[in-house]
Image (cartoon, helix red, strand yellow):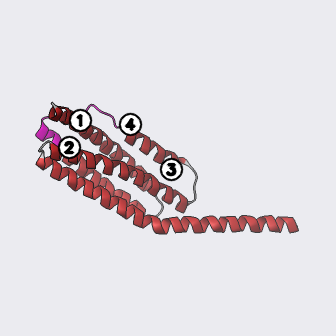
């Protein structure tokens, strides 16, 4: 009975991930287009191709389970993508926008890391060795993407902080000049 309950949960979580990955396939091009740093744009484009591979792996798992991947919408991913879209709509300086995009993308990666970690553990418990291997491969790629984003954020965050300090200095200079006039 427990295994049947876990199998049901496993399939539902896989459907959730399938929905999440499909949503990302639509969101990543928008994030790439909004990114101003070349490395960040290239990273989003590379992750888009990886995400298509994640979908193919999930489809392979569903075929083996004789189940359909359809029928569920991942509202968690929907919310994360909505937050990222709102950020893109703001009129931010380039480095600040890129820093925000990285933050939004890392939230997505952490969500996926948690989800893939859970379903790979379910697959292991259920004896789904082939699926477990595919899910762990995707989990590893998600972790690598998160690490790349962290590495990119170091320079971009410094750039955003520097431009902010310059803007503050310019504003103080204008106030002082206006006060002398």
CB within 8 Å, label 2 to label 3:
no
Which of discs 2 and 4 lies nearer the camera? The answer is 2
Q: Percent position (x, y) of residue 85?
A: 47, 46
Of pointers 3 and 4, the one earlier in the residue sequence: 4
Can residue 69 be seen at all in this image of the molecule?
no
CB within 8 Å, label 3 to label 1:
no
> Image point 40% across, 67% down: which residue?
151
Give the numbered dot on residue 122. 2
Q: Percent position (x, y) of residue 30?
A: 42, 50
The image shows residue 47, relative to residue 125, as above or below, that is: below
The residues tagged by marks 1 and 4 sit, at their Cα atoms, a distance apart of 17 Å
Based on the picture, tell me whether residue 23 belongs to the magenta stretch. no
Of pointers 2 and 3, the one earlier in the residue sequence: 3
- In the rendered image, which residue does mark 3 sit on? 88
Q: Percent position (x, y) of residue 170?
A: 71, 67
Quarter of the image where the C terminus is located: bottom right
Q: Secondary structure at mark 2?
A: helix
Q: Which residues are magenta?
A: 59-75
Give the numbered dot on residue 9. 1
Q: Percent position (x, y) of residue 29?
A: 38, 51
Number of other residues with Cα within 10 Å of mark 2, as a class: few under 14, some 14 to 19, many 20 or more: many
- In the rendered image, which residue does mark 4 sit on? 75
CB within 8 Å, label 2 to label 1:
yes
Which of discs 3 and 1 lies nearer the camera? The answer is 1
Quarter of the image where the N terminus is located: top left
Based on the picture, tell me whether residue 65 belongs to the magenta stretch. yes
**Which residue is outermost to the right?**
181
């Amino acid at each position: 009975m427990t295994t049947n309950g876990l199998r049901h949960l496993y399939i539902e979580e896989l459907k959730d991930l399938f929905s999440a990955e499909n949503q990302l396939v639509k969101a990543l091009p928008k994030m790439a287009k909004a990114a101003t740093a070349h490395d960040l744009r290239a990273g989003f484009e590379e992750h888009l191709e990886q995400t298509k591979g994640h979908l193919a792996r999930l489809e392979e798992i569903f075929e083996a389970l004789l189940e359909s991947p359809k029928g569920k919408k991942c509202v968690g991913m929907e919310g994360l993508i909505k937050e990222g879209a709102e950020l893109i709509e703001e009129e931010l300086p380039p480095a600040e926008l890129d820093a925000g995009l990285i933050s939004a993308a890392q939230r997505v990666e952490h969500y996926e890391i948690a989800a893939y970690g859970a379903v790979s553990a379910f697959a292991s418990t259920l004896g789904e060795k082939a699926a477990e291997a595919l899910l762990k491969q995707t989990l590893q790629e998600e972790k690598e993407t998160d690490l790349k984003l962290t590495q990119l954020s170091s320079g971009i965050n410094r750039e955003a902080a520097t431009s902010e300090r310059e803007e503050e200095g310019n504003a103080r200079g204008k106030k002082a000049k206006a006060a002398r006039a």
